[in-house]
Image: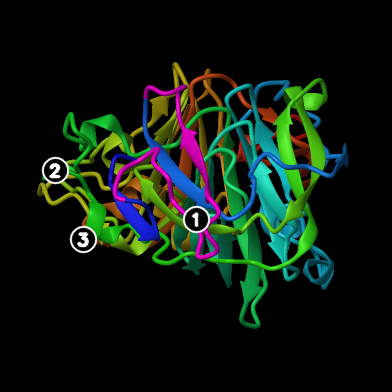
Amino acid sequence: MAFYRQVGSVPPKRHTQHRRPDGGLYSEELVGEEGFSSDSALLYHSGIPSALVDARPWELPDQTLTPNAPLVPRHLKLHDLFPGEEHKATDAVTGRRLVLGNADVRISYAVSSLTSPYYRNATGDECVYVERGSATVETSFGALEVGQGDYVIIPRTTTHRWVPTGTEPLRTYAVEANSHIAPPKRYLSRYGQFLEHAPYCERDLRGPTEPLLGEGTDVEVYVKHRGNGPGGLAGTVHVVPEHPFDVIGWDGCLYPYAFNIADYEPITGRVHQPPPVHQVFEGNNFVICNFVPRKVDYHPLAVPVPYYHSNVDSDEIMFYVDGDYEARKGSGIGKGSISVHPGGHSHGPQPGAVERSLGAEYFDETAVMVDTFRPLDLGEAGVASDDGKYAWSWSGRGPSA
């Protein structure tokens, strides 16, 4: 994210002495992508960022994946995963349940009310969508106040924790990459500025504005990293001698930030626009798109709902957040649903949806879509929340009929 910020106290020149009030030196840490060849930030710590006093294994939530076999479209009901008061004993990190995944990306869901442990993901960036509720995301760069509709982008290895606020449970939809997550390159100039045709810009991004200094010793930090467990992952708890939030200043182009879906300006046309106009972020072998309330196609003979399309190169995962999704009426899909439309299956509007949409001027719908360019398998939460009948919704009968 090549958008420069400076927060707190930094010296006039990088890699030069920066002294504490007692005369000692702050510790300078470079956090950088792609070795030393891409975006980075320089952080100034009062302690030593490499210091450890203990370490032990962390058993990750179930990362088992089950192939989508036989190959069928599926309807996953995420709101069934955390019944009753279960959220009162859950946090937004250790409480994540794996819905879908492959070698490039994992999609998880959590409903929580507890403060998470301090956590860093060493396998890739995270994009966490806040479906409902609010929280303070405390990070080593500073704090972000987030709420309904916010995407929270957290760069790889950023130490942070989720602190729910308010009275409503925090519902989070986590997209964890094995790469970096950034705005699409076609939205940016060669120097990293958002271009005029981009549906959002720097003014819409909220980054940390002041240092967040924590107190405490022998603090536990949960680390997800590459390993030999399911999905090639493993977990470790590091115990650090001083609080990980000891950064008195930082600057650079790599940091956590939030962007609200309501600030996305939809691109519309006389006839139906293809999904790339809805793209908001991208990672290696996947993209993230969002569908927001918008004026729809205004050609006098336009068909506002999508045409049937075959995902030759990708799996399409749609998370239905709010509104009334016209193309899926009659399928059982509603708020909190995911549709899984795998590559190899042609999908599109439900029977009757095309006729019902004719003459529509506006769609009131909010959804987050992840398209992957390698097949997705089902996580334990995907298996548990599958309605078992969505595949037959276009024909009106299934194998037992």
Indicate the position of residue 397 as horizontal and vertical percent values: 66, 37
Q: What colour-coding does the image apply?
A: rainbow
Q: Quadrant of the C terminus?
A: top right
Q: Which label belongs to residue 289?
A: none
Magenta span: 12-37
Indicate the position of residue 7 as horizontal and vertical percent values: 38, 59
Q: Amino acid at mark 2?
A: His
Q: Amino acid at mark 3?
A: Glu
Q: Quadrant of the N terminus?
A: top left
**Regarding mark 3 in the picture, which secondary structure is present there?**
loop
Q: Which label belongs to residue 361?
A: 3
Relative depth, front residue between 122 and 239: 239
Indicate the position of residue 288 as horizontal and vertical percent values: 43, 39
Marks 2 and 3, the one that precedes in the sequence = 2
- Principal secondary structure, stretch drawn in magenta: loop
Q: Nearer the viewer, mark 1 or mark 2?
A: 1
Rendered residue at 73%/41% (across/down): 223
Depicted 30 relative to depicted 119: above or below = above
Q: Are marks 1 and 3 in contact (CB under 8 Å)?
A: no
Q: Is residue 348 within the magenta segment? A: no
**Regarding mark 2 in the picture, which secondary structure is present there?**
loop
Q: Which residue is mark 1?
A: 141
Q: Which label belongs to residue 197?
A: 2
Residue positioned most to the bottom: 167
Q: Amino acid at mark 1?
A: Phe
Rendered residue at 40%/34% (across/down): 282
Marks 1 and 3, the one that precedes in the sequence = 1
